[in-house]
Image (cartoon, rainbow, N blue to C red):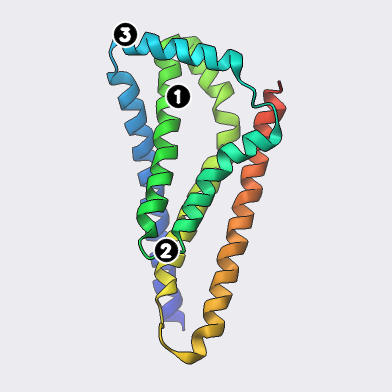
Amino acid sequence: MAKRNKVIDRRGQKIITIVCLSFLCGVLGGAIAANLMGDGAKSELAGIIHNAAQIQESGSFAVVFWKYLKYDIVIWIGGWLSLGLFLSGAAFLLRSISLGFASAMMMVTYGMKGVWGAMLGILPQNIVLIPAYIFTMCAAIYYLMAWNEGNGKRGLRRERRRKQTEYCLLFLASAILIAIGAGIEVALYPL
């Protein structure tokens, strides 16, 4: 039993390391993409960002919560599917790339004001949201591998239900973290 726990711990550590590195690579890729854009595209995006900031109607908690929860749901659903790693990974990387792109675009477009804008406009809620996404992605990968352990054995039906219940509870925990992140955004930036 102790040997099995060490294997699980080692596997969990590898999963966490890979997920965190992939998130960082996504953020870096988004930042590089923002910096490689031409001046015309940068000024066009700056106009879009400026207009979006003026039009933004996301003062409602439900709108902000849904904006972040949809990524979490796609990542979580991927944990149920046999090829769900691609679905989960795509949603996870999309979120990290968009975060890196938005931050870098603000910094490139507005200079020092953009640095402060990213720190004050993007960072507070993402201090909670990023760990929630990493948590959900790690759980999706872990349970994707766990679903197939001991398949075909009649006595493991109860074990499989226990894993499914755990996975659902972990999703609820991540949804609570996302609600906290959405609450931070709504509290800091009301309509």
Residue 33, percent from left and from top: 31, 25
Report which residue position mark 2 lands on: 81
In depth, the one of 164 and 9 nearer the eye is: 164
In the rendered image of this protein, does residue 131 appear above or below residue 157? above
Disc with the residue nearer the chain's start (1 vs 2): 2
Residue 119, percent from left and from top: 54, 23
Q: Do the residues labelled 3 and 2 touch (CB within 8 Å)?
A: no
Q: How crowded is mark 1: few (under 14 residues within 10 Å), some or many (20 or more)?
A: many
Left or right of 156, for residue 21: left
Give the CA distance from mark 1 to mark 3: 19 Å
Disc with the residue nearer the chain's start (1 vs 3): 3
Give the CA distance from mark 3 to mark 2: 42 Å
Q: Kindly identify the amino acid type of the residue bearing the numbered disc 2.
A: Leu
In the rendered image of this protein, does residue 69 appear above or below residue 161? above
Residue 138, percent from left and from top: 46, 56
Q: Do the residues labelled 1 and 3 touch (CB within 8 Å)?
A: no
- Element marked by disc 2: loop
Report which residue position mark 3 lands on: 40
- Image quarter where the C terminus lies is top right
Quarter of the view holding residue 95: top left
